[in-house]
Amino acid sequence: MPTATRLGAGAGTGADRTLPPRPPGPLIWAHAADPDRIPALVQLAARAESVRPGLTMLLTLSDASVVPDNLPDYVLLDRMPDEVAADCRAFFDHWRPDVGVWHTGHLRPVLLTSARQAGIPLILVDATEAGFSDSRMPWHRRSERTALNGFEALFANSANAGRRLARIGAMPDKIHVTGPLQEGCAALPCNEDTRSDLAEDLATRPIWLAAMVQPDELPIIIEAHRQAIRAAHRLMLILVPRKPEDGEAMIAALTDQGLRYVRWSEGGHPNEVTQVLIADTYGEMGLWYRLAPVTFMGSSLTAGHGGRDPYEPAALGSAILYGPNVGRYVQAYTRFARAGAARVVRDAATLASAVLRLNAPDQAAAMAQAAWEVATVGAEVTDEVLETIEEILDRRPKTHARP
């Protein structure tokens, strides 16, 4: 999936749009009314697919939404049909979801009515107080009440949200006050033999990781490491470029600064005098997060990159540092920072200072524990929602899941 893919590029509009074929197997349609909560639905898809291999999630967003990087193959994207009955019918006739998951609120009555007419079971998850109007206008209340009572289950993310649903007129036995869905990603995998060998070889070395570094951030990262090794001369940096092909530029910069490095993609292995390990390969972030007790999340020091997902290092026990430009993940970073699980840095000096401070094992461990706790909040809610989805899928005719 291309980075920052934007929706709505398909040919045609409304019922005439050209759509990709429906995949075989069970299909969950999930709508993210709040783009900031897309990661929670992607995590739900990951959990559902692990239980039922071959399952697909169709994720719908608004035209202006920006898609997160590296969506898994089992998550497809489409924009919402307009609030026109013919467009909604065409959408459901094409995709034929086995279950619909509506996130947050801001209901679309025509679309949801079309879903019910198509026989698609619906559940509401992460319902927020702000997602539903407190209007006293009778017609508005009737519209929301009718839409709400078309859902099989309503999962509210707070007691206030549950009370708002009840005031609108939702059936009390459908309301479950559960808290928010888990937003974090599943722990990234790694080769355990490789991890064990590296951990043994580097057991006495302090390590920090700079992950997904953009070319225009590289001078800041290198200067921060140079400052840090003046105080901790055995400190090693694992340097992961945003694109592996940027490895050559990193070599040139490190050579220019006189830093000793090895290149992982060419079979390089760090030893006692290695100052930088260039990790310029795909698919090994799970290894680097496990090895480094401290991670700086790149694509965040300079403007225009939007940051990277902090849940990746958090799920694997690494303390988090980040720059000020994390627009695509600002709510997530705010959540971690408030919990004492992440710290913002702004330049080479503040990055070097933070790395040295977290070089103390107790400091890094406390932050990593706080990060892990944030990352796992909502896991029980995801389990409960997944159980409801599984119950619906189990009773659906299997022929419905075929193209």
Image (cartoon, grey):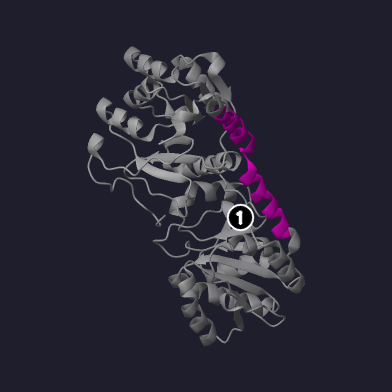
> Which one is in front, 122 or 102?
122
Q: Is residue 336 left or right of residue 140?
A: right
Q: Is residue 232 left or right of residue 45?
A: right
* Horizontal and vertical percent position of residue 261: 60, 81
> Which one is in front, 395 or 100?
395
> Which one is in front, 110 or 29?
29
Residue under the point 41% across and 49% down: 67
> What secondary structure is the stretch in magenta mostly built from?
helix
Residue under the point 39% across and 29% down: 106
Q: Which stretch is magenta?
A: 363-390
Residue 78, quarter of the rendered image: top left
Residue under the point 72% across and 57% down: 365
Quadrant containing the N terminus in the rendered view: bottom left
The answer to whether residue 81 is above or below residue 43 is above
- Secondary structure under tag 1 reads loop
Residue 256 in sight in this render: yes
Q: Is residue 169 left or right of residue 6?
A: right
Q: Is residue 387 a member of the stretch shown in magenta?
A: yes
* Horizontal and vertical percent position of residue 343: 58, 57
* Horizontal and vertical percent position of residue 288: 63, 64
The answer to whether residue 369 is above or below residue 138 is below
The answer to whether residue 9 is above or below residue 288 is above
The answer to whether residue 116 is above or below residue 383 is above
Mark 1: which amino acid?
A: Leu
Residue 59, quarter of the rendered image: top left
Residue under label 1, please give it: 188
Residue 104 in sight in this render: no
* Horizontal and vertical percent position of residue 276: 61, 77
Quadrant containing the C terminus in the rendered view: top left
| Picture mark count | 1
> Which one is in front, 360 or 174?
174
Q: Is residue 17 a member of the stretch shown in magenta?
A: no
